[in-house]
Amino acid sequence: MVGRYPQRIAYSVSHSNLYPHILGRGTPDLIEMKHHLLGNPRRSHNKSRNGCAPCKRRHVKCDEKQPECGLCHKRGLECTYLPTKVQTKPSPSTTANGDSHSRDRTSPPQVSGISRLQELRLIHHFSMVTAPTIASDDTDLRFWQLELPRIATTHDYAMAGLLAAAALHLASSELEKQAFWLETALIYKTQAISGLREDLATSHGNHEVKFITSSLILLLVTAYPGIRKDELQVDPLREVLAMRSNLQGCTMVFNQIYYGPTTTSIDFWIRRERLNQGNKDQEREILQRINEVQTVIDQCQSPSRQIYQSAYDLTLKALHTWPRQIESVVWPTRITDSFLLLVQQGDWIARIIFLFHGLDLHLASRKWFTAGAGRRLVLGVLQADGLEIPPQWSNLASWMIRAVEI
């Protein structure tokens, strides 16, 4: 009995005054056990949750040595530590006037499980590897490789966004450590979002920092589904609505900079002229196909005709800016709720216009962070369970599938 239920007996001993029928008037064996346990109480200990990933999987105690714990060294295993948040209390300071200030925003992101050397590697990776993959030309490269990292060093939440982007990029290339880098990216992303929300609520300045952080968060939201490659069925409307939510903050700060009275260090990137340098033959074919939709709208007698036309014009404008994708990126923030409702209800004119937005996203999918975005959207619309494509749109739907290489 003692061997099978030690925890139950220990619990009863510690509450002997509540359970006199078990201890105090029990058998000699139990009384002896009572005196033994009360005389030698179990030592308390603190349970650590900072062990390495291999030790956690094997449910063994980790000595938490870094960069390699003793058990992993002994067994010849790769020792990796999953990052965890460190719970810290804010330490506001108060001025002589009684105004409360938040804690220093220039302190580094507080994440345990990742060493300082690993964070330095992420910073180096972003500047030297990630930034060139995002940039389309020298002006882009100057923004992503030089100005953005410089601005990120002024606020911890902006630096968290940079570290998250670098970790997500590593997750796309280092497949053997993908789970670790995805977890790292999500933790830094959470810090970036939390810090940005706090700054938006408490400060009317810091436009540059807010803009680069919201841009990094937008990049993370765009890239994550394609890198993780979820097996769940795609919900294209949900993806567009999520993109719209993340774009609203970015657009707001962009407008404050673009239309603001003061100059910023990133004006060279925000205010530059963006030229169309796309594939002319491909663009001609796409415009010819979307013109078929305009013909149908012109002949349409539906009460929703104006909704169709407004969405069509917005989508056509986005296609004309390819490959710069400025209009296609902000498309979710400008499209109306009434149009998205038509898509949700299965209206085929609305669905076809929506598919052209997916094609527009696909034209930008040569970048790692947009890989598969357009294809997922088209796939979610045309290959939904039980979907029957009307004969009127079957030819255009088949062309769309070939265009996004499904």
Image (cartoon, helix red, strand yellow):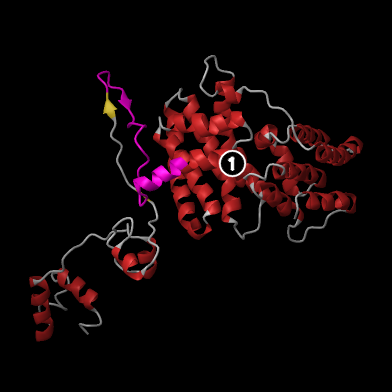
**Left or right: 337, with 188 as reference point:** right
Residue beneath the point at 59% across and 18% down: 259
Residue beneath the point at 66% across and 54% down: 234
Residue 162 against residue 99 in the figure, above or below: below
Residue 364 point in image, percent of width and height: 68, 42
Under circle 1, the secondary element is helix
**Left or right: 392, with 364 as reference point:** right
Residue beneath the point at 64% across and 35% down: 136
Q: Farthest residue toward the right? A: 299
- Is the C terminus in the top left, top right, bottom left or bottom right quadrant? bottom right
Residue type (three-letter) at the residue carrying disc 1:
Thr
Q: Is there any visible trace of residue 175 in the rendered image?
A: yes
Q: Is there any visible trace of residue 15 in the rendered image?
A: no
The quadrant in which residue 252 appears is top right
Q: Is residue 102 magenta?
A: yes
In the picture of the structure, the residue carrying the numbered disc 1 is 133
The quadrant in which residue 292 appears is top right
Front residue of this view, candidates 268 and 256: 268
Residue 201 against residue 384 in the figure, above or below: above
Magenta segment boundaries in residue numbering: 95-124
Residue 47 against residue 187 in the figure, above or below: below
